[in-house]
Structures are given as structure tokens and as C-alpha cells.
Amino acid sequence: MGLFLSTIVNKVDRKGRVSVPASFRTTLSQQLFQGIIAYRSFTASCVEGCGMDFMERLSDSAQTFDAFSPEQEDISALIFADARQLAWDPEGRILLPEDLIEHAALNETAAFVGKGQTFQIWQPEAYKAMEAEIRARALKNRPTLPLKAAVKPTGGDGK
Amino acid sequence: MGLFLSTIVNKVDRKGRVSVPASFRTTLSQQLFQGIIAYRSFTASCVEGCGMDFMERLSDSAQTFDAFSPEQEDISALIFADARQLAWDPEGRILLPEDLIEHAALNETAAFVGKGQTFQIWQPEAYKAMEAEIRARALKNRPTLPLKAAVKPTGGDGK
DNA sequence: TGGGTAAACATGGGCGTCAATGGTATTGAC
DNA sequence: GTCAATACCATTGACGCCCATGTTTACCCA
């Protein structure tokens, strides 16, 4: 199981702890670092989350920009400088840093929103509003997605 | 057997459980994840269903968009954020979440409608109406389908 | 070809397990 | 010594697993 799917709302206790959904944890279970990488979204009021492997992919991708180029600078500042590793405790909870809570305007609860390769953490009501907006747009525009050919399951790329 | 075919109506019990048709289960039997992926259709009052492999194809296809692009955002919200992994029990039943039931206006029964690579879940009466509509349109428009060349079954893609 | 039988599938309900959650204790840093 | 982070423990409630039963389909044999 390799994707972050569905939206799960969990409670944030008074210590700032929140359970990472069990399904998200299993998605990350093969990783060396037992926890998540989190950084403030630079497009929305939410927290971006992913595993260390995705961070490395981002790093590789960022190298398409020249070293010392302005784009490289910006990406570094926006992502790598802001990212932190949040290990979970034996119960599967992470401790949300104060500035992340602020940025996403989290209070009692936090919504873990699957985005396939990554996920986001939202204030549930805020996400609901955003989702309604996207859904309304989709109903009008009927977006389509060019489907790539299926990868033959022959042989093992699995695992 | 690799396709979802025909339409099967099954009962939804008071717990919200429904049997996935046996033929659909055999279609998915080779998959790692023993269950279905389900998400609300963003164009109709029904639930979209598929296997994990198809979800991964969608994820691959969605990556033609840049990370952090608006298109990527929308697709994620509409599909990945809404998708649930519904594992079936030893009897082949899944538990339908409340909001999916609402979205498709399901009550006593649910119709599993094969669509080839994927399938849909409808309130039976609603589907009947939709089907009549599609049939009427077809009678008028006479849709055609450019047929691809047959793939040689030489070699083992297996089993 | 028809009846009988057996297997597979669909369905209903009870119970155990695990994830989520809240609280307390212990450890370590400043 | 104080504060904060983390480990430990206990509770609860949803969901997954098990068994029991009804119903349909497929198969076999006369």
C-alpha cells in the first residue's frame, strides 16, 4: 500500500499531540525514519506532509535548477528550511510544533488529507470550504485526466 | 478475468455492509490490497470504485502535472482526498461509510455497475433512470469507438 | 432432460481486537 | 528546580473476524 488516501479527522490534545492515521502510518512503515516530514504550505493555510523518500525526490527534482540560482534559493527556503521531522510516539502520535499549528489555524481537531504521494494537514472547516469550492468548479468544468498505460504487474517492482 | 462487467444488485444490511459481487472480487484477487477503493463521483450521484492498481495509475498520471500546481491540487482533492480503502471481510463484504451512502442516496440495496477497468455503485432506481437516458442518447447519436489492434497474448503476463 | 445434491454466494448477528484518546509518570535539558 | 518532551498505561468505541443460516446456481447422474 503506497498512497495517502482519504481524509481523516483526529483530535489535537492539550499537549499538541495528534494521532497520525493508522493507514498513513502503514504507508510510511517501510521508511527508515518512523515519522513524518512536515512544512508550511506556501500556497494555502495548511501543513504539507510526506515521508523522507518524497523529500529526497523533491531534492533531486530541485537540482534541475542550477546551484545558486534564484529558483534553487526559493525552493530551499520554502521547503527544506521549513521542513521538520516529526517522529511518532509508540501510540502513533506526533507533537505538532506551535508555528505549524498557527499557520494552519488548528484548534481542537486536525484533518489529515491524502494527496496520493503526499498529504496535508488542515483545520477541518477550512478544508471543507476549500473542497466545496473545488467540487463546485469540477461540476462545471468536468476535468479529465489523460490516463497513462498500466504498468505490467509482471515481475517484481513490488515492495 | 480482468474486467468489471455486468450489473449486480446486493443488499445493504443495517450495519451498512454490502457484499462485493464475487465476479468483481475475482477481478481484484491478484491485488495486494484485498478490497476496493471508493470515492464520490464528482459528476453524478454515485460512488466510483476501482482497485488499488488503478489508483496507482491515477497517481502516476496525475504526476504529469507539476507538484504544487493547481491542477494537481484539484485532482488530489477530488480523488485522493476522497478515496477510501475498503477492505472486505472474510465473506467478501465491505462497510460503506455514511457519506458515501448519502452521496449515492443508497437505502436498502446497492447496484454494482461494471465499467471495464473500474465500476460504480448506484442506488438501483437511479441507475435505471440514468441507463435509460444513456440508451436514448445512443439511439440518436450512434456513438462509435476507434478499435485498437489486438495485443498478442504471446508471453506470460500471466495466469 | 429432469430431479436431486452439493457447492458457492449472499446475508444476519455476536464477540474480540486494535486504533484513537486522555491521563500520569519519568527522563532530560536549560 | 522547572519546564517540556516522551514513554507508559488505561479506557472506549468502532471495525474486523467468526460462526450460523438462507438462497441461488452449478453440477452430476439416472
Image: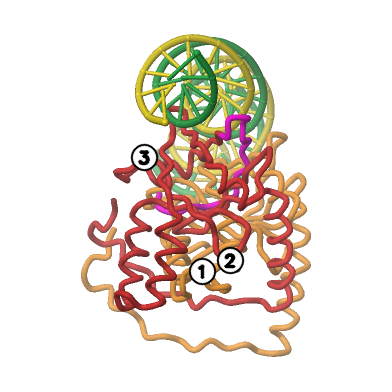
Chain colours: A red, B orange, C yellow, D green
At label 1, which amino acid type do we have? Phe
Nearer the observer, D15 or A114: A114
Nearer the observer, B94 or D8: D8
Quarter assignment of residue B159 = bottom left
Q: Are marks 2 and 1 in contact (CB under 8 Å)?
A: yes
Q: Which residue does the numbered mark 2 point to in the structure image?
A: A43
Tell me the CA gap for discs 2 and 1: 8 Å
Element carrying mark 2:
loop
- Magenta-tinted stretch: A1-16
Q: Comparing marks 3 and 2, which lies closer to the viewer?
A: 2
Determine if the magenta segment contains residue A9.
yes
Q: Position of residue D1 (x, y in %)?
A: 50, 13
At label 3, which amino acid type do we have? Gln
Q: Which residue does the numbered mark 1 point to in the structure image?
A: B68
The chain under label 2 reads A
Q: Quadrant of the N terminus of chain B?
A: bottom left
At label 2, which amino acid type do we have? Thr
Element carrying mark 3:
loop
C6 sits to left or right of B84: left
Mark drawn on residue A34: 3
Local crowd size for mark 3, using a 10 Å CA cut-off: few (<14), some (14–19), many (≥20): some
Q: Main secondary structure of the magenta part?
A: loop
Residue at 62%, 55% (x, y): give it: B8
Q: Position of residue A17 (x, y in %)?
A: 55, 34
